[in-house]
Image (spheres, rainbow, N blue to C red):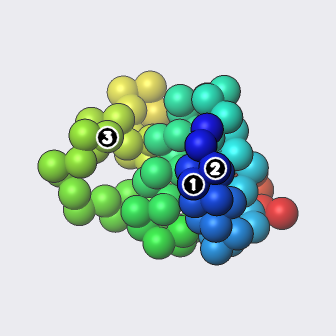
Amino acid sequence: MSHHATETVALRRQTMPARFRATYDAAMSGRSRKKAVHAHCYECLGWEIGHETDCTSPACPLYPYRPFVASPLTQNLSDEARAKRAARATRSFQT
């Protein structure tokens, strides 16, 4: 990574909420494409938890891969199971 790119990544990391830094670091290291999609979506949504399903950008190349919409595997989950998944996801972004 060039010096300019390293500075840019450091600045972006410094300005984001701390709870998202581990996800961002995993994405930027190339270790996880899934974390890269999550980091992009959270950044686009202003780093706000609770607005994951509010994407209004169908022209985004990642729109079909949004990680926060129901997949065929989760469409039939009970409200209790959905609440448990949401709690786990929220905990994973907390510091």
In front of the other: label 3 or label 1? 1
Label drawn at residue 59: none
| Residue at image location 50% in from the left, 59% down from the top | 42
| Lower position in the chain sequence, tag 2 or tag 3 | 2
Tell me residue 37's x, y (percent).
47, 41
Check disc 3 and give the amino acid type.
Leu
Q: Nearer the viewer, residue 89 or 78?
A: 89
Check disc 2 and give the amino acid type.
His
Question: In this rendering, would 22 be left or right of 56?
Answer: right
Determine whether label 2 and label 3 are within 8 Å by CB.
no
Would you say residue 66 is visible in this rendering? yes
| Residue at image location 31% in from the left, 59% down from the top | 55
Label drawn at residue 4: 1
Choose top left, top right, bottom left or bottom right for residue 95: bottom right
Residue 50's place in the image compared with 5, above or below, is below
Q: Residue furthest left?
A: 59
> Label 3's element?
loop
Q: Work out how far the residue at label 2 is from the one at label 3, CA to CA, in angstroms.
A: 28 Å
Which residue lies under the disc numbered 3? Answer: 62
> Label 1's element?
helix
Q: Nearer the viewer, residue 8 or 12?
A: 8
Q: Residue furthest right?
A: 95
Residue 81's place in the image compared with 16, above or below, is above
- Local crowd size for mark 3, using a 10 Å CA cut-off: few (<14), some (14–19), many (≥20): few
How many discs appear?
A: 3
Q: Nearer the viewer, residue 95 or 75?
A: 95
Label drawn at residue 3: 2
| Residue at image location 70% in from the left, 69% down from the top | 14
Q: Work out how far the residue at label 3 is from the one at label 1, CA to CA, in angstroms.
A: 26 Å
Question: In this rendering, would 52 be left or right of 58?
Answer: right
| Lower position in the chain sequence, tag 3 or tag 1 | 1
